[in-house]
Structure formats: C-alpha cells, structure tokens
C-alpha cells in the first residue's frame, strides 16, 4: 500500500533531481530559472538544518547528563563550549572574542592533534615496514620511495627519486584511485536512480 | 642488545630525536635545496598567462587542523595576486570548514601594499551554507547568492564585485581542501565542467594521492600538496615565506624516517638470524 506522505516526499525529491539534471545538460531559460529557484531554497534549509543539529546535539547530551551516563562530565564541557561559542558568536563584539576562541583554542588543539600523528607515523613506519613476504616488501619499497621523493632535498641527493615518486603516484596510485572513483561514481548514480524511481526509501527515514 | 636496538625499542628516544631535528631546522634554517614540481609549475604558468585585473576565485574550505599545511599556499597565492593585480575573491561553502576567520587572519597577517584595499583588490565573501548546491548557485548568480561579504557589507557596494555576475567572470578557481579527499569534485562538477574555468587545488599531503587522477586527466590544472606545495609556489613566484622555512625540517624528518626504517630492518634481520643460529 502506498503511503501518501512517502509519495509526496518521493515526488518532491524526484522532481527536484529531474530539474537539476535537465539544468546540467540543457540550456533553457525556464529550466535554468526553476533550478536556480530550487537552489535558492538550499541556503536557508542548510542554515536551519545546522541550527536543528545543534539543538538535537544539546538535547541528546542533556539527556545523558541527566541520566548520569558514562562520561557525562565530558558532555557538560561539550555543551558549555557549544553555548559559549554560540553566545560569543551572536553578541558584539563578534570579531575579537569569537576569533580569539577560534584561533587560540580550537586551532591550537586541532594543530596539536595533527602534529602528534607524526610521531605515531614514525614509530609505526619502522615497526611495520619490514622485509619479509612479497606483499610487505612491496609496501616497504613503495613507502620508502614515496617518503624519499617527498623529502624536498631528495631531488638534489638523487635525481631519479622524483621520477620514481612520479611513477608511483601517476601509475599505480592513479590506476587504483581511478578505479575507486569510478566505482563510487557508479554507486552514487545508482542510488540517485533508485531515489528518482522511488525505490530508495532509507533516506526518507522509512 | 646493541645501541641501535635499545634506541629503536624505546620510542621516546626516537621521538626526541625527531623533535630535536624538526625544531633545530626551524630555528636554524640550513637552506637545503628545493626543486619545483611540474604540478606547481603548471599552476604558475597558468597564473602568469592571466591578464591583470582578472578575478581569481578562491574556495577557502580549510579547517583549523589543516590550515598549517595549506596556509602557506594560501598566503603565497594571496601575495602573488596582490603583486600581479589579480582580484582575490574568497568564499567558503563547506559546513565543516572554518575558512571565514582564517581568511580574515591572513588578511591581517600579510603585509599588504598601501594601494591595495579590501573590497577593491581582495574580498572575503564568508561562509555560504548549502555545500555543493550553494556553490552551484553562486556560480550561476554571484550577486544573488552571496548577498553580503564576511564583514556584513552588501556586495553591491564592493567595487571588486561590480563586474562579477557569474562564474564566467572568473579567470581561475583555486580550491583549498579540508580533511577528506572529496573536495575537488564539487569544483570540477560545478565550475570546471559547466563553465570551462581552470581549477587548481591545494590539499594536505595525505589527501594528495586521492586527487592525482584529476591532475592526470587534466581536469585539475595542478596541485599544491601540503607545505611543500606552498614552498614550491613561494619559490617559483620569488616570494619566499613560511613554507620555504619549513622545508629543512621536512627534509630532515623524512630522511630520519628513512634512516630508522633501514635501521629497523637491519636490526630485525640481525636479531632473527641470531635467534635462528641459536
């Protein structure tokens, strides 16, 4: 039995997709106008979705705090940080305090997290990259020449390092990634086709 | 146990050596040589062919975490555009990115010539919610989509935006990526394919291999990969900055990594053959 609500949602999705596809392939002022009008809806919808996401997150963590769930203390800090950022972002003077939080706190934490990975990568490299089986030897050689080629000084030490790096990146790497990209593209196309035909209902929450 | 074995078994020693090498090279640059890659030179050649007064669109979709890797590329591009009289127009359409405050930070940090003015030679259009759909709408109708800049000024009052109506009014689009490798696709789908505008890209080193197919196919003009890409761009434009300074530490850390990989394998083979002999 067809659910009227689902049919309405699917029809909206199908019509929107159809207009956008037409706009991409054909030059027609009516289609262009329709696509632009639909596109204009995206900006306010996205802004509302972000607000809604923040509210849902706050309610979810508030529930966990109320129930004293595991690690509830962290959620207190999470909600406090979120509320502080929102309030500071909305109240004047916006530039000074908001940017101070961004640059001094968030940026520093983020950079530190990324920087720490260098140490783990180093220890993982010399523990994991070992001569042994054919597969592990190939991995070792690949990692060795990519690391060597990426060192800025490598071109001066050995000119061939750049050629080896270029070959690894442009031939085996591109071949593998191209395969992945084509597979992903086909998958996305099939999901879109299923949505267009009303066969894909998981995105509507069914 | 040999000394090498003791060092390799105690991670703390290896970490300290790496830290000292990186810090020493930053404090006392050695001036180690650096070669400019083909991908950076292609971008530079394309930029050189663009006449002064043209508009360069910049997708400032970087995050706080990724900015240290791509900040030098962004600063170098900004300085180059100011020097070559190219209009520098930034917009961020990625909800995960924090391009808006970072662009403003660069505008404050970089030494801007007195004759160059905000809103005339460069502008930050801020964050536009809606991801790829917003970018598509921006490409179709710039004035109708990005109504105000990041500082709240209506873009109709900004001289730089006077003649920017659609994506056709841009000479080049320069995207800056975030954490994952899915970002160039939106620029290719919404800018390069429909408007035939050249697209260049800057990304983290870890993401670069996933983007290589687009460079190989010619869809992306070139790629500035991480700090090294920024340093190469600084070198080719003759405006050395923060990227070039970091190259010595990058060289030393990479060579140290190779050294410990070799030492680790020798040690591992030595201990394995020792055990087999016993």
Image: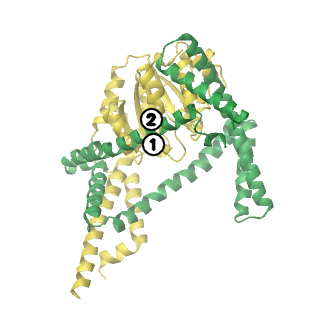
- Location of the N terminus of chain A by quadrant is top right
For the point 30% across and 70% down, the residue is B264
Q: For this view, does B89 lie left or right of residue B32?
A: right
Tell me, yes or no, if residue B118 can be seen here: no
Tell me, yes or no, if residue B269 can be seen here: yes
Q: Chain under label 2?
A: B
- Asked if the residue at tag 2 contacts the one at tag 1, i.e. Cβ–Cβ closer than 8 Å, the answer is yes
- Residue A18: where, in percent of width, then height? 56, 24
Tint of chain B? yellow
Identify the image quadrant of residue B92. Answer: top right
Identify the image quadrant of residue B35. Answer: top left
- Residue A104: where, in percent of width, then height? 61, 48
Establish whether labels 1 and 2 are both on one chain: yes
Q: Chain under label 1?
A: B
Q: Is residue A64 above or below residue B7?
A: above
Q: Name the residue beneath numbered marker 2.
A: B184
For the point 35% across and 66% down, the residue is A128
User: Mark 1, residues whose alpha carbon is within 10 Å: few (<14), some, or many (≥20)?
Assistant: some
Indicate which disc residue B181 carries.
Answer: 1
Q: Residue furthest top?
A: A29
Tint of chain A? green
Q: Is residue A133 above or below residue A206?
A: below
């Amino acid at each position: 039995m067809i659910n009227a609500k689902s049919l309405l949602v699917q029809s909206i999705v199908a019509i929107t997709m159809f207009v956008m596809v037409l706009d991409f392939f054909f030059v027609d002022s009516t289609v262009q106008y329709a696509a632009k009008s639909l596109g204009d809806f995206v900006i306010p919808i996205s802004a509302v979705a972000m607000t809604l996401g923040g509210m849902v997150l706050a309610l979810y963590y508030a529930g966990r705090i109320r129930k004293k769930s595991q690690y509830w203390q962290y959620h207190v800090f999470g909600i406090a940080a979120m509320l502080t950022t929102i309030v500071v972002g909305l109240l004047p003077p916006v530039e000074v305090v908001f940017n101070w939080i961004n640059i001094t706190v968030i940026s520093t934490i983020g950079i530190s997290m990324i920087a720490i990975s260098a140490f783990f990568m180093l220890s993982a490299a010399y523990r994991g990259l070992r001569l042994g089986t054919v597969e592990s030897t190939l991995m070792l050689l690949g990692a060795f020449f990519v690391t060597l080629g990426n060192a800025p000084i490598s071109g001066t030490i050995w000119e061939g390092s750049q050629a080896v790096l270029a070959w690894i990146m442009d031939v085996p790497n591109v071949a593998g990634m191209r395969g992945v990209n084509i597979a992903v593209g086909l998958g996305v196309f099939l999901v879109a086709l299923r949505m267009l035909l009303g066969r894909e209902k998981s995105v509507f929450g069914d | 146990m040999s000394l090498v074995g003791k060092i390799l078994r105690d991670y703390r020693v290896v970490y300290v050596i790496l830290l000292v090498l990186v810090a020493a090279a930053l404090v006392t640059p050695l001036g180690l040589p650096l070669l400019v890659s083909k991908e950076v030179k292609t971008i530079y050649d394309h930029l050189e062919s663009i006449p002064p007064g043209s508009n360069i669109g910049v997708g400032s979709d970087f995050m706080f975490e990724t900015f240290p890797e791509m900040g030098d590329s962004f600063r170098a591009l900004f300085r180059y555009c100011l020097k070559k009289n190219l209009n520098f127009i930034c917009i961020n359409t990625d909800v995960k990115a924090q391009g808006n405050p970072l662009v403003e930070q660069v505008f404050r940090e970089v030494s801007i010539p007195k004759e160059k003015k905000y809103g005339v030679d460069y502008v930050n259009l801020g964050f536009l919610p809606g991801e790829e759909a917003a970018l598509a709408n921006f490409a179709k109708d710039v004035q109708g989509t990005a109504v105000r800049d990041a500082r709240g000024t209506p873009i109709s009052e900004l001289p730089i935006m006077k003649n920017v109506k659609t994506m056709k009014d841009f000479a080049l689009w320069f995207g800056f990526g975030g954490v994952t490798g899915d970002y160039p696709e939106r620029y290719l789908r919404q800018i390069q394919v429909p408007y035939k505008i050249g697209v260049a890209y800057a990304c983290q080193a870890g993401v670069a291999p996933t983007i290589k197919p687009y460079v190989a196919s010619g869809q992306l003009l070139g790629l500035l990969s991480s700090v090294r890409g920024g340093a190469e761009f600084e070198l080719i434009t003759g405006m050395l900055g923060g990227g070039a300074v970091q190259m010595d530490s990058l060289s030393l850390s990479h060579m140290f990594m190779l050294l410990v990989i070799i030492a680790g394998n020798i040690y591992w083979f030595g201990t394995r053959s020792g055990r087999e002999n016993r």
